[in-house]
Amino acid sequence: MSTDRHLPAITGEVQFWRMEPRHWEPALRAVRELGIRSVATYLSWRRHEPVRGERDLDGRTDPSLDVRAFLRLCRENDLTVILKPGPWICAEEPNGGFPDWIVAETDLLARDHAGEVVIGYNPPFLHPMPSYASSRFRAETERWLRWVWGELAEFTGPEGPVVATQYDNEPSLGFRDTMYGFDHHPEALASWERRRPGAPAPQPRVDGPLEPTEAELDWIAWQHEYISDYLAWIAAVTADAAPGLLGTVNLNTHPVRGEPQSGPVIAAALPGAVVGEDHYFVPPLDENDLAGLALAAAQAATSDTARIWAPEMQSGIWRSPGELVEYPDPTDDELAAWWGAAIALGYQGFNLYMLVDRENWEFAPIGPDGSHRPLAEAVARLVATLESVPGLDGYRPLVDETLPWSDALRSRAYRIRGRQADPTTPWDLPEARAAYDAVEAAAFQAVLAGRQFALDPGADAPSVARTPPVASPAGVLARIHENAEGERLLHVVRWSRTASAEVALVLREHQGSLVHTLDGTVTPIDDDGRVTLSPGAGLQLYRV
């Protein structure tokens, strides 16, 4: 089998330990039939070591925990694997995958500014979170990681199938993303003291200067380093225990993007790693969801990530235990449009989460028994579409405007922001977030107007927007991408449930015709630049 240490454009999540073992092989065959060549899966520490020292990777206590058997099947089906042992995995798993005996150890738990234990949010579970700085937590984590990689060494070598891993999961202490929410564990504060001797950690305030103080700015920078140092430590342990694996990091969307997880800082600490944001929407899909995708893609482009790639791209929808569902189910067309919009807006690929249904999840392309659902056809078409253009990664969207993305505007907003796990927490100083809010509003307006934007960390104001090279009707996303040779591709996605089946576009800079990359259909462009397409669901690519 091919064990190249790179990420294909499209991979898919198959959490085998939540399936019946007899369905593993049918599910993997179903994955391969869609053209996907790589799968991803977590390992839940709490399931493999529920009692300290009592471990199971071969299914002795539960056949669904036979990691070796699953990896052998992946190898036999010519599938590479992104194996993600955490230590925290979230994934609608109690404790986010931490064993009960870990979260019961109070001396290794993170603390907030008031000295209270930091409680992680893993829908619908709330649980204590260990401090990333705790030497005891790191010792237990290193023991877990070295055991996993040591036991699975036969699967990480030249014969594979494991070629990549993920360092922790959405590292923000269980979605604690307020400036004052972490981490005041003694060992964390010791590192702050080394950075700023004699300075106490900042406390919440609503008075005084609107701008963050020097100490507050330093605290924000320290939080960036606190997270990146932890990830770099996991990467070092992994590299020693399982040399040669490609590393990935998944970020989650925060109320102030880039805080406290700084993509550029993390990417700089992990050279060669893929650092990207996870993406979900609550149906029905709308312009706010697309603006979030656009912001994340633009944000990733400001870092040194090895690829603009999303470790989790919604495929189906979560069904957390006890959740009150007050929104419609996602349609297959919406999910196909979600994936296509990500590519059109600048992503170079992603991991479909989930590709195979499991407990606490519905509407994935493949059923838990390995049967193809109707959505599977959209996956196969997406894979074929992306493979129809050699060198697709070399094409990047043409930018119509730039928006400011300075540390100052984010820090000002982050200082007074509530936490993601409690999104109704009010801002206590609306004027402090005005500049940041203006950027998010501008991103939304850009999506409405069909303009592609970039983020400029050195700018304080937006650039003058140019007229985009393609105009599209409401409910349709259209972008022009170009490679270094000047070759251009038109990306078209009909994303709205109400958009017309026929799409009328105006190409302002092009004449001649469009050639569909998948089926070769030629569509002439009128002298005035008008062209009418019937794109169907999902991403459509045309050579211009």
Image (cartoon, helix red, strand yellow):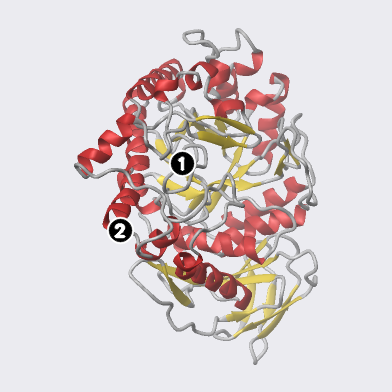
Mark 1 neighbour density, 10 Å: few (under 14) some (14–19) many (20 or more): many
Can residue 412 be seen from the camera position used here?
A: yes
Q: Nearer the viewer, residue 260 or 542?
A: 260
- Residue 102 position (above or below residue 525): above
Residue at point 69%, 71% (across, down): 476
The amino acid on which the numbered mark 1 sits, given as a three-letter code, is: Ser
* Labels 2, 1: front one: 2
Can residue 388 be seen from the camera position used here?
A: no
- Residue 108 position (above or below residue 218): above
Sequence-first tag of 2 and 1: 1
- Where residue 436 is drawn, which disc sits there? none
Q: Is residue 243 left or right of residue 58?
A: left
Q: Is residue 300 left or right of residue 310?
A: left
Mark 2 neighbour density, 10 Å: few (under 14) some (14–19) many (20 or more): some
The amino acid on which the numbered mark 2 sits, given as a three-letter code, is: Thr
Q: Nearer the viewer, residue 209 or 190?
A: 209
- Where residue 172 is drawn, which disc sits there? 1
Residue at point 52%, 51% (across, down): 418
SS for callout 2:
loop
Residue 67 on image: x %, y %: 56, 19
Looking at the image, which residue sits at the far front? 207
Total numbered circles: 2
Residue 461 on image: x %, y %: 40, 77
Query: Where the C terminus falls, by quadrant?
Result: bottom right
SS for callout 1:
loop
Q: Is residue 481 left or right of residue 213?
A: right
When asked about the image quadrant of residue 127, the answer is top right
List the residue tagged with mark 2: 213
Residue 318 on image: x %, y %: 70, 40
Q: Nearer the viewer, residue 266 or 336?
A: 266
Q: Nearer the viewer, residue 464 or 198?
A: 198
When asked about the image quadrant of residue 426, the answer is bottom right
